[in-house]
Image (cartoon, grey):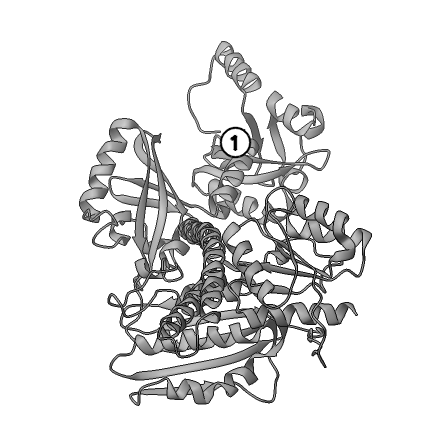
């Protein structure tokens, strides 16, 4: 060893005690790696006694194979005069497990100044290394952007932060302030740089802060994030620990939820309006039925030359117009009578081409795409489908006062089992506020007197009644596309009405059942003028009592559907229970049978109010013929 005054025995003993009791591993190696010093901490770590360790090649026995060459080279450099600090390697223990140690290594000189060997002091940092690896794994793998920053800018970041900003390397972010990767203004109108500094001061005073922020990629794409900042101390310096949570998907979901809620609100609103419209139309049809019957009765008793007949004809015509209006309301409310059949929508549109072209001004170019090669079957009322097509076309026409292009397409989607009717115009378009109301009855953007506001509400009612949906795509100045989707019909046999052949003698016994006095009274007088003997009942229970008491005198029952006490459907069931083939006819302000269980009553005809006398007589005759 180096020449210096010899140590006192007490000093040597003290030094030996310090080495022996030190908490760090202390070992000495000769240039050939043989152990000449091995303290108690080394014995405990490696589970090898001092006696067994002495003279052993430390590198070959205790150093992990992949580290042996580096350790041997480091020993050579230390013997040459280099002092190694914080050198790490993995040691292999007796049981095969590994521990990571960090070493401070220095050489020991002999008396002549030649290298005698090295002394290494090591600390077991295995747990610390594992903790660092776990932290690094979490840091690098986190989906949230994680950053460390100080007064100079970003110090470190994980890959997720780079991905959010569209960067490829940490060098592009380290040393910069996050606000540099933001648009000039935040969504609230604040200048990004000023707001960032203000939030930084607030975070400093509070210690932690969470807020919404919008960053921006180099290509201009906005990146909405929720920022969480917390101040901490790292190696004596104040740093900020920052987490960015991407809010793009959350905002998309919020927009989707808002859209769904708007649609739900609209559907509930339309349902409520539909119920109101249906109830109004039903009651109005009862009034119209009484008015029409009374007008016909008055007209029948006047001579042909009487001038009043002209006024009564006007009244009848006006009643018919009012009836058409109520049918539109019922179409919207989905409560109108329907003649459901299997209809080729493509063929229907082709058949309507002539009518559609004559309905368009010369400045509007009409294009129809409805292939004859592929039938587009839907289950619906043909006349109502024609009304849908015509109303959509006329609505598009009115949106192009100065001309334009109108495209009508019919497409089959076998994957979704749908038939699509797509009507596109190049007109003025519709704003968001109007789009929320266009299917409401009586809502119209046209001037007063230019429309009833029922066209699109009728379309809505017919489409939804047929199990379909309608969607509007439009922006002001960019035209409008109405997308109607019907379920594709398969395996449906259309119902057909058996025509009546020959005449039938009119029996003189009819039970008339209706809770509306005016309807019952005027209908009775109409029937009596044509030779019927009438019995009246104001509800189903009264009618049942009359039927039981006078069954032999009755040939048929004409009953309203909706009545108090016992309605028409329940009455029909009670009658058919005792007389299965007894003729019945329903009449009503709308087709309520679709809302009830009509098993066994599908053959009972339904007459819609208001009705002409000849319609009533014809329906009664067919019912009697069908009953035999």
Name the foreground residue: 347 vs 204: 347
Residue 231 coordinates in the image, percent (x, y): 32, 32
Judge from the rendering whether residue 402 lies leftward or rightward of residue 281; answer left or right.
Answer: left
Q: Which residue is mark 1?
A: 119
**Residue 578 picture location, percent across and down:** 81, 52
Q: Residue furthest top?
A: 10
Q: Is residue 103 above or below residue 606?
A: above
User: Is the C terminus in the top left, top right, bottom left or bottom right quadrant?
Assistant: bottom right
Comparing 130 with 601, the one in front is 601
Q: Position of residue 143 (x, y in %)?
A: 47, 48
204 to the left or right of 370: left
Q: Residue 39: image x %, image y %?
A: 60, 23
Does any portion of residue 417 appear in the rendered image?
no
Q: In the image, is residue 590 above or below residue 235?
A: below
* Residue for point 25% across, 48% down: 179
Residue beneath the point at 24% across and 37% down: 200
At numbered mark 1, what does the secondary structure look like: helix, strand or loop? strand
């Amino acid at each position: 060893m180096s020449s210096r005054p010899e140590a006192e025995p007490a000093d040597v003993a003290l030094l030996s005690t310090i080495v022996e009791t030190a908490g760090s591993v202390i070992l000495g190696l000769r240039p050939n790696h043989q152990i000449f010093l091995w303290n108690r901490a080394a014995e405990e770590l490696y589970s090898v006694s001092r006696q067994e360790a002495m003279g052993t090649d430390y590198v070959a026995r205790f150093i992990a194979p992949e580290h042996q060459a580096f350790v041997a080279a480091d020993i050579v450099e230390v013997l040459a005069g280099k002092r190694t600090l914080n050198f790490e390697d993995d040691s292999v223990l007796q049981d095969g497990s590994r521990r990571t140690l960090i070493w401070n290594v220095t050489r020991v000189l002999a008396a002549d100044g030649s290298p005698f060997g090295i002394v290494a002091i090591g600390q077991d940092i295995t747990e610390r290394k594992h903790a660092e690896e776990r932290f690094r794994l979490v840091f690098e793998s986190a989906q949230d952007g994680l950053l460390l920053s100080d007064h100079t800018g970003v110090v470190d970041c994980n890959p997720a932060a780079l991905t959010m900003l569209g960067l490829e390397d940490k060098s592009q972010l380290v040393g910069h302030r996050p606000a540099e990767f933001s648009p000039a203004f935040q969504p609230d109108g604040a200048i990004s740089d000023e707001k960032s500094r203000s939030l930084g001061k607030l975070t400093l005073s509070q210690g932690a802060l969470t807020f919404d922020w919008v960053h921006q990629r180099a290509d201009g794409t906005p990146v909405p994030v929720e920022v969480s900042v917390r101040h901490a101390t790292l190696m004596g310096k104040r740093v900020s620990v920052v987490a960015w949570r991407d809010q793009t998907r959350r905002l998309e979901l919020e927009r989707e939820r808002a859209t769904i809620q708007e649609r739900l609100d609209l559907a509930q609103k339309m349902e409520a309006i539909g119920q109101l419209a249906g109830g109004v139309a039903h009651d109005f049809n009862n009034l119209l039925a009484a008015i029409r019957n009374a007008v016909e009765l008055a007209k029948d008793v006047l001579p042909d030359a009487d001038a009043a007949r002209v006024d009564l004809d006007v009244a009848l015509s006006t009643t018919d117009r009012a009836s058409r209006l109520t049918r539109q309301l019922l179409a919207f409310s989905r409560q109108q009578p329907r003649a459901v059949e299997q209809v080729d929508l493509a063929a229907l549109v082709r058949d309507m081409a002539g009518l559609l072209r004559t309905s368009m001004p010369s400045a509007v170019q009409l294009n129809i795409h409805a292939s004859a090669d592929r039938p587009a079957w839907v289950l619906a009322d043909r006349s109502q489908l024609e009304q849908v097509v015509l109303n959509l076309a006329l609505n598009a026409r009115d949106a192009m006062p100065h001309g334009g292009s109108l495209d009508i397409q019919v497409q089959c989607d076998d994957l979704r089992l749908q038939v699509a009717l797509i009507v596109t115009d190049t007109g003025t378009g519709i704003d968001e506020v109007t789009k929320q109301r266009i299917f409401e009855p009586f809502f119209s953007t046209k001037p007063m007197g230019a429309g009833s506001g029922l066209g699109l509400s009728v379309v809505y009612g017919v489409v939804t009644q047929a199990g379909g949906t309608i969607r509007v795509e439009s922006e002001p100045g960019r035209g409008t596309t109405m997308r109607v989707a019907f379920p594709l019909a398969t395996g449906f046999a259309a119902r057909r009405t058996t025509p009546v052949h020959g005449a039938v003698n009119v029996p003189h016994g009819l039970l008339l059942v209706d809770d509306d006095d005016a309807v019952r009274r005027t209908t009775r007088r109409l029937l009596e003028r044509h030779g019927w003997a009438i019995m009246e009942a104001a509800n189903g229970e009264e009618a049942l009592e009359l039927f039981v008491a006078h069954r032999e005198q009755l040939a048929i029952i004409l009953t309203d559907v909706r009545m108090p006490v016992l309605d028409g459907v329940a009455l029909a069931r009670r009658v058919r229970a005792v007389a299965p083939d007894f003729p019945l006819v329903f009449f009503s302000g709308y087709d309520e049978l679709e809302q009830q269980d009509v098993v066994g009553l599908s053959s009972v005809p339904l007459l819609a109010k208001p009705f002409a006398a000849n319609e009533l007589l014809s329906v009664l005759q067919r019912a009697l013929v069908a009953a035999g």
